[in-house]
Image: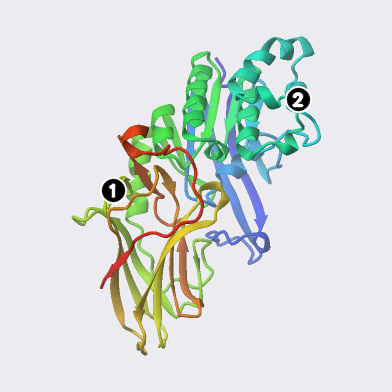
Amino acid sequence: MNPPLSVNGYSLLGDKTKTQQKITDNDTSPGEFWALRDVSFEVQPGEVLGIIGRNGAGKSTLLKILSRITEPTSGRAIIRGRVASLLEVGTGFHPELSGRENIYLNGAILGMRHAEIAQKFDEIVAFSEVEKFIDTPVKHYSSGMYVRLAFAVAAHLDPEILVVDEVLAVGDLAFQDKCLGKMEEVSGQGRTVLFVSHNMQAVRSLCHRTILLQNGQVVRDGPTLETLAYYTERVRNVQVRADTAVGVTAHRRGSGAVRFTEIQVEDVHGNVKSSFEMGDTIRFSLSYKVVTSIDQLYVAVALWGGKTREIITSAHHRLWGTKVECGYEGRVVVEFPECDLRPGEYPLYFWLGDALTNPYDVVDDLVLPLTITTKKSYKELGFDPTMQCGFFNIKSRVAM
């Protein structure tokens, strides 16, 4: 049997003025970069393929090309069957139309007949849990409601290939579990799923095979457990070089007066890890080098808030209030004692700068997101851990 999806040599040449992606190819002009380069793979019927990698690796770009939203510079994909895509909140929906009308609109886009959509309609609405608002224009929906209905449509209208990006992170944990179960069901019916996520647990539980993208290229393609182990080890072993030029990578910004030379997330025993239980003490071991003499130095560790990419909390501490000479190398440990973060994933952001918030070095998305878990019930916790919270202060301390 021919595979439902075969990608051969996909490449996409971009404009560096529209992004800060690192340029690694000698034959690329100064104003260009390869968002994807020679990406090739096949996906078999009933296979759930995970696609992972740091932000900017090319994951979403690849899915947009496969969904015929973006045209590649070179290469081709052979797609056998109907493709349903869930790439961004609201993709394929018309904001002025009701939820009911958008179900029929999406079905028509997928090539479904009216009778086929009507047959699945009640099942779609029940899964989405938006019955009360099904005749309300979707422009009034919350992002969570949007995702519920969009996923329900994409998964229930019998696509041969289901393409899902990180958009599921907008939903609460209960709905994410429901979606993962539906994708397992879809694959069990012999259909194909492409799943992009930063949630390593979801990838581990759903995908038997996973591709790792880095700088637009496939660096690993194999069994999920092996690929995740390789990715985790690769990220943990990344050393941030003090002589890296300012602006070379999207994960680094600042004047360069001081540079991080090593970043590690550890437990109280010094073990490098990224997953912690609620109540654990989390340590951020940060080494740095002064490249140009400075008058003062502050450090900050911040947590991003999911898809919104807003800083929801940060720890900010003074390291030096007097002049520090060029060549000085130091290390600081920022500690979150008995951290009571709610369960979830928190991308990390590290900052060195002065009291006026002028950054010397800013690094984000370089290490794995901080993952918080709990085995306690709602009753034991005293609150619903799936409910999102806003901005908050966090206890922290510094050990030089």
Residue type highlighted by circle 2: Asp
Quickly name the residue at label 1.
279
- Image quadrant holding the C terminus, namely bottom left
Q: In which quarter of the view is residue 38 placed?
A: top right
Q: Position of residue 345 (x, y in %)?
A: 43, 45
The correct choice, above or below, for 51 with respect to 359 in the image is: above
What secondary structure is marked by label 2? loop
To which residue does mark 2 refer? Answer: 135
x and y, in percent, of residue 381 in the image: 34, 39
Q: Secondary structure beneath disc 1?
A: loop
Mark yes or no: residue 128 visible.
yes
Image: 47 above or below 63: above
Q: Amino acid at mark 1?
A: Gly
**233 left or right, relative to 116:** left
- Seen in the picture, residue 147 relative to 245 is either above or below; the reply is above
Specify whether 102 is left or right of 189: right
The quadrant of the image that shows the N terminus is: top right
Of labels 2 and 1, earlier in sequence is 2
Q: CA distance from mark 2 to mark 1?
A: 44 Å
- List x then y, in percent, for residue 200: 41, 39
Please give the name of the residue rendered at 59% of the width and 60% of the height, measured from the top-left corner: 27
Q: Position of residue 173 (x, y in %)?
A: 47, 34
Q: Is residue 222 visible?
A: no
Choose between 138 and 352: the one closer to the eye.
138
The residue closer to the viewer here, 316 or 57, is: 316
Q: Residue at x 67, y 34 (%)?
A: 67
Side (left or right) of 212 relative to 117? left
